[in-house]
Amino acid sequence: MSIFTIDENTGDIHATKRLDREQQAYYTLRAQARDRNTNLLVEPESQFIIKVQDINDNEPKFLDGPYAARVSEQSPVGTSVVTVVATDADDPTYGNSARLVYSILQGQPYFSVEPTTGVVRTALPDLDRELQDRYLLVVQAKDMVGQMGGLSGTTSVTVTLTDVNDNPPRFPRKSYQFSVPESVLVSAVVAKIKALDLDVGPNAEMDYRILDGDGLGTFRILTDPNTQEGLVILHKTLDFETKSSYTLRVEASNRYVDTRFLSVGLFSDVATVHLLVENVDEPPVFSSSVSRMVISEAAAVGTDVGSVSAKDPDTTNSPVRYSIDRRSDVDRYFTIDSHSGLIRTDRPLDREIVTLHNITVVATESLDPSQVGKAVVLVSVTDINDNAPSFAIEYQTFVCENTKPGQVIETLSAVDRDEPENGHHFLFSLTTEAAGNLNFTLRDNKDNTASILTLRGGFLQWDWPVHLLPVVISDGGSPSLSSTNTLSVTVCDCDLDGHRRSCSKGASQLLVVGLSTAATAAVLTCILTLLGVVMVTLAIRHRRREPLMVDDERDVRENIVCYDDEGGGEEDTEAFDMFALRHLNQTNQTCRDPDLHPPGLPRTPESRTDKNQLFQEFIRDRLQEADLDLTLPPYDSLETYAFEGSGSAAESLSSLNSLDSLKLLESEQNYDFLREWGPRFKKLADLYEHQEGGGVTS
């Protein structure tokens, strides 16, 4: 719908509704005149511009309000706080409808506003935040230059006063008094004081310090950063019996001072603090919290070690009783006299087991057993020469077959559990029995080491695979202690550079250059065991021959043989007991070091399932043993033969042909030597005693 209409008769233009200049200040209209009769244009179309004339119909408005501002307290008069701005929608170019004037309706006399600019300023010089820290202002803007009939608008301004350090700290009281138990721990807070400062934030931060007083060295003071309190802290232990009260003069001062307000006075204050020490029943106190004592490990049981002393610090001076905390002396090496505090040994000491004993001694008041004091006693055990030296390690020494005389094959060192004051001085030597051997010698290097040198070359593995060299090590102490240590030297096959290619893992012999008592006993035990095995073997062999002893008139083939094992047959009833033919060295390996068994000599299987294989293995074993061991004497004539034949002293092994020969051999055998061995062998002699007529008694 059009806002304007035109009277077609008169040409008057009328507005159909209220116009608002603030919404649209100009309108453009087009009009034309026509002949009423002919409806033809009388003149060309005309354009009209209608300008809306302003009236004062809009009040001023603060578009940014309400306002919030901050200003320092104690600011000079006229200090700018904030600028307020109002706008008027009326036409500023027409009349006074948009000309504004500012004024304060609320907030006087503390603040003022410039009428034309809207700048809010302080109006008083002594605005004090501590009295009032916030102000609410109401500012008005009025058009028509503030004249009657003008329209107005208002806004609020909140002004907050910021703090400045214009107030010094002050103690509420000039004197404080506190009670402190004498048992309080060092570094504990014993008192709190606080000076008041009306300022806030950094302006209220304070530092406390002790100016003087008899407690200057016993106490110190710090500032709590959160509460700004002065914390009085104990710096040294208190003793009611020594001093029962202390006095301190404490100063509190601002950390940051505004020089503009120094005229007010010093920004500090002083107060007196009285500290009264309360008496507390205290535990016994040792003269020393840690005592050090020394005793020799040779000291007899009951020897005095040292004494400790403790007393009751209270005025009652209760008697003290001493004891040892057994948790610190579980093995009960020490005892203590409950009255005198004298510590004694209660069992033998050994420095090599425990060098330093750390025990806790307890002192208890006899009148009040709950009051207990403790002290540490460190007992050092001094050394005596009670341990013999020994090899530092278990040596694995070898010598090459192609070695030369004078070559060092091992360097020995020793260890001793004792610790002499001047260090160890070991002496090395060979035993008297070993000193004359032709294979090795020992050279003491005079630096707690010794060298083993060869005296010859041409060592052979099959000759003596392992040499045992007894070495005596003396510690040179007072009294001097020594021990004999056996060095095992293995003969190895080496290349030209002396690098080992193979060594004897086992051997049938050991060259014992010198034996200790224990080694000699072991050798004798093996010899006796071998001797017993010889006797048992002879008895078993004789019993196996017994069923074959038949009358001469009877044919051998008529003999009935009973046996429980496989092998053999009716034509071979005697010779195939391979275990009876085995060398004694093979059946008694328990008396020899298993590491000395020749690596090339396989063990004989215990099974008798295959006659031919068993016999072949027996022959091969005996041949290898004979090749490796030329010094052992043969046990029978079969020692040197690997096959059966007429050339053997035992003739054929077949029972068909050898029965008569066996009878002849047994008839010629003399067992009288068994009776010479004593009563223990009487039964064995009776079993093998030869009877006239070729018979054998049983």
Image (cartoon, rainbow, N blue to C red):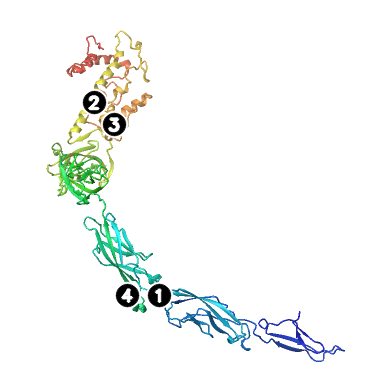
Q: Is residue 105 left or right of residue 438?
A: right
Q: Which residue is mark 4?
A: 266
**Mark 4 touches mark 1? (CB < 8 Å):** no
For the N terminus, the image quarter is bottom right
- Mark 4 or mark 1: whose residue is earlier in sequence: 1
Q: Is residue 96 shown left or right of residue 369?
A: right
Amino acid type at image mark 3? Gln
Q: Secondary structure at mark 2?
A: helix
Q: Is residue 124 visible in this depiction of the protein?
A: yes
Distance (Cα) linking label 3 and label 2: 22 Å
Which is more N-terminal, label 3 or label 1? 1
Q: From mark 4 to mark 3, how far is it between C-alphas?
A: 116 Å
Mark 1 neighbour class, 10 Å CA radius: few under 14, some 14 to 19, many 20 or more? many
Q: Amino acid at mark 1?
A: Val
The numbered mark at residue 624 is: 3
Separation (CA) of disc 1 from disc 3: 114 Å
Q: Amino acid at mark 2?
A: Leu
Residue 164's disc is 1
Name the quadrant containing residue 451.
Answer: top left
Q: How packed is label 2: few (under 14 Cα within 10 Å), some, or many (20 or more)?
A: some
**Residue 136 point in image, percent of width and height:** 51, 75
Q: Closer to the observer: label 3 or label 2?
A: 2
Nearer the observer: mark 1 or 2; the answer is 1
Query: Which amino acid, mark 4?
Result: Leu
Residue 483, placed above or below residue 228: above
- Which residue is under mark 2? 530
Residue 689 figure quarter: top left
Q: Earlier in the sequence, mark 3 or mark 2?
A: 2
